[in-house]
Amino acid sequence: MTCYSEDYRAARTRLLAAAQAAGGWTHEAVAHPVAGADGEPIYMDVLWRGPEAASRVLTISSGTHGVEGFCGSALQLQLVEDAPVLPPDTALMLVHAVNPYGFSHLRRVNEDNVDLNRNFVDFTGGAPENDAYAAIDALLNPAELPDGAMAGIAAELERLRAEMDYLNFLKAVSGGQYAFPRGIQYGGAGPVWSRRTVEALWARRLANRRVVVQIDLHSGLGASGVGMLMMAANDDEPHKALTADWFGPMFVTPRPLSRADTILGGYMNEAMETRLPGVRVVPMTLEYGTEAGDVVLGAMIEDNWLVHHGDLAGERGQDIKARLLRAFYPTDPTWRAAVLERGRQVFAQALAGLGAADLEERLTG
Ligand SMILES: [Zn+2]
């Protein structure tokens, strides 16, 4: 039977049922303060398998970007059904629906229109500024979006892409911004529910471990059906060499050198490293490509307009929602099979790596 579900409720129900059927899992549900799309209660769910006192943990999270949880949840369900043998002294922690609101309501962002992976910044002393975004907010966040307007927006974005310096263009369309609460890539005005909840979870479940390998599951970026492992690390950091041995080619970006660079920061993975100071954390993202970048960005712009200015229940609203869902969750069986196969490979590689006797030695450098 397929691991893929068509709504948040089904995805959650099936994962919890599979864990119960498999046995050996403990479950904790943290209720979200806002209801789901059907008025149903929604949760961040935590599943744990393996020794409570394990010194090594593989943690796999889904739905940080709400609607991307369909892909991530399927990968988690497959893993539970596979029931892999864990190395000694190693536990598995699954976090299902880090952003359950976005998962249920088919949004990439949360209940506050916040992109969680832009929210993990230090808000004391003010949020980062993103002038590149500010200059084109009107383009990305229009108050009116007549039929056919998306073609014009796409053409203008193409023009800017050709004209602007690459990093500046990236900051403008993909970097966090903290000044336009109804804009896209909004990072919030303080730590949101999902951030507070996940940080409390780390403190409760991960703070006393020796090694934590984190894989945060995403979709919507890269070549269709390809699952690319991504990580931030400088060349001299031991986990860069270690993960190259485990996984082969990865997309590794150097650490930001200045606060201006951190406009492309605010990521959950980065925060996990700073929140778990005594733990050797290997924080990775497994990102699956779906559609071309302009299609994905276009779907986000339309969805953002719909939520703030449109009619969700109307025919056009339903159409926009359907396109947003498919931009992050394709139906193509070839895509879906490739996603699961790659996930199985990555999780097995991570577990094998965690089982290595010289793991801590190598992470110490
Ligand atoms: Zn994502």
Image (cartoon, rainbow, N blue to C red):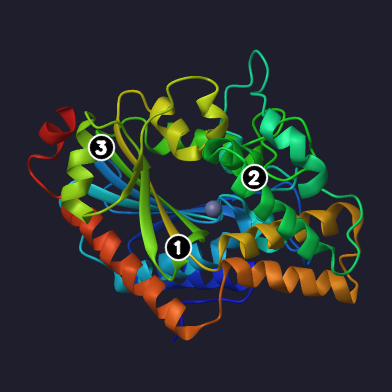
| Type of amino acid under label 1 | Tyr
Q: Which mark is residue 173?
A: 2
The secondary element bearing badge 3 is classed as: strand
| Mark 1 nearby-residue class (10 Å; few <14, some 14–19, many ≥20) | many
Would you say 17 lies left or right of 149 here? left
Q: CA distance from mark 3 to mark 2?
A: 35 Å
The secondary element bearing badge 2 is classed as: helix
| Mark 2 nearby-residue class (10 Å; few <14, some 14–19, many ≥20) | some
Q: Residue at x 32, y 62 (%)?
A: 24
Would you say 284 lies left or right of 263 here? left
Query: Which image quarter is the N terminus in?
Result: bottom left
Q: Position of residue 234 (x, y in %)?
A: 29, 31
Q: Which mark is residue 84?
A: none
| Type of amino acid under label 3 | Val
Query: Which residue lies under the disc numbered 3?
Result: 211
Would you say 230 lies left or right of 51 here? right
**Residue at far top of view:** 125
Residue 99, placed above or below residue 7:
above
**Quadrant in the picture for residue 76:** bottom left
Q: CA distance from mark 1 to mark 2?
A: 19 Å
Q: Residue at x 23, y 48 (%)?
A: 90
| Type of amino acid under label 2 | Val
The secondary element bearing badge 1 is classed as: strand
Q: Which mark is residue 288?
A: 1
Marks 1 and 3 close (CB-CB < 8 Å): no
Q: CA distance from mark 1 to mark 3?
A: 25 Å
